[in-house]
Image: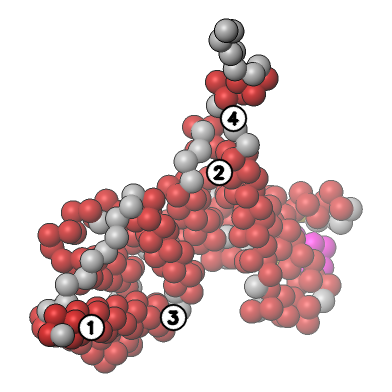
Amino acid sequence: MTALTWFRSLARMNQILLGMGGVIFALTLHVLGVAGLSSLQATTVLFAIAFILRLRQNQVIPHPHPTPPHFLLSGIWILFLSLNQTSLAAQNWLIYLLPLTTAIGLSLLLCGRTQWGKYYQNLALFLILTIPIERLIHPLNNLFGVSHFMAKLSTFFLWYVGFNVNYHEDFIVFPQRAMWIDPHCAGIATILWMLQLAILFLILIPTRKLYKVIVPLVAISTVLLVNGIRLGMLAFFAAHSPTAFDFWHSDNSQIFSTLPIFLFGIFCWFVVQDKTHQVNPQEKFASKFPPLTKGS
C-alpha cells in the first residue's frame, strides 16, 4: 500500500512539473507577444511541435524525475517571467534568445542532466529562432536592394495589366502620384520567416537533394510574387483612391501575409506526396514480376 501511495504521489508530481513547464512555455509566448514579435511567436510554436516530433522519430521519451529543486527553479522561473514581461520585451537582441533558453531550460527540467545528451541535437532547431529577423531588414535591403527590386516587379505587373506606370529607384510612379516602398514593406521579414519554415520542413521531412534547393527557392519566390501584387495594388490605390489605400495598408491586409504560407503549404504537401509515392526500384520490379516458385 505504501508503494502504491508513493507511485501515485510521484505521478502527481510529474503532472505538476509538466504543468509548470506548460506555464513557462505559455509565458514565453506571452512575452514575445508583448514585444510585438507575432511571427516569432508562431514560429516558436511550430518549432516546439517539430521538436516533439523529432523526439518521437528518434524514439526518445522524456522521463521527468521531480525533486524539490526542480519545483523551486520552476517557480522562480515563472515568477521571473511574470514580473519582467515588459523589461524582457524591451530587450532588442536578447528577446530572440528567449525561445532557445526556454527550450534548453525545459529540457533540463523535464529530463535532467543525465538524459539531456539525448536532446541537445534536437534543440539545435531553436538556434534558427535566435536570428533577429526585424533587425536584419535594413542591412539586407541595403545589401540586396530588395525595395528597388520590388518596385521593378510591381511596376512590371501593373504595366502588364495595362496601366501607365513607371519606377524610379524605390518608387512606383503613376502620373497622379508616386509611392515609396519602405524596406519594412518590401517583404524581407516575411522572406526570412518563410526560410525558417522551409528549413523546418526540410529537417522534419527527408527529401531528395533537389528539393533541398527547390523548397527554399519556392518559399522566397512565393513571398516575392504575393508581395509584388500587394505593392502594385497599394500603388494604384495611392494614386486613385486614398481611402482604399488606407484600408489595405493596415491590419486589413493580413490576407497577404497568410497567402504565401498557404501556397507554400500546398507546395510542401505535393513534396510529401511525391516522397510518399516514390517506389523502391526493387519493389517496383517485384510488383511487375511475381516471385519464382520452385517446381516439385
Q: Which one is nearer the viewer's eye here, 124 or 224? A: 124
Which callout, 2 or 1, points at the residue further toward the start of the chain? 1
Which mark sits nearer the N-terminus, 4 or 2?
2
Find residue 33 and name its label. 3
For label 3, count other residues whose C-alpha is less than 10 Å away and answer few (under 14), some (14-19) or many (20+).
some
Q: What residue sits right under mark 2 in the picture?
A: 215
Q: Give the quarter of the figure containing the C terminus.
A: top right
Mark 4 or 3: the one toward you? 4
CA separation, marks 1 and 4? 49 Å
Q: Name the foreground residue: 121 vs 182.
A: 121
Closest to the observer: 88 or 234?
Answer: 88
Q: Is residue 75 visible?
A: yes
Counting from the top left corner in percent of width and height, residue 34 is at: 41, 84
Whether the residues at callouts 2 and 3 have beta carbons within 8 Å, the answer is no
Q: Quadrant of residue 110?
A: bottom left
View extreme (top): residue: 296
Residue pictured at 75% horizontal, 53% vertical: 155
> Which residue is pictured at 37% across the width and 59% down the height?
51
Q: Which residue is mark 4?
A: 279
Q: Residue furthest right?
A: 162
Circle nearer the viewer, 1 or 4: 1
Dot 1: element: helix
Does the CB distance between marks 4 and 3 fall below 8 Å?
Answer: no
| Residue 286 lies within the magenta run | no
**Magenta segment boundaries in residue numbering:** 173-177
Q: Is residue 60 left or right of residue 180?
A: left
Identify which amino acid the numbered label 2 is placed on: Val
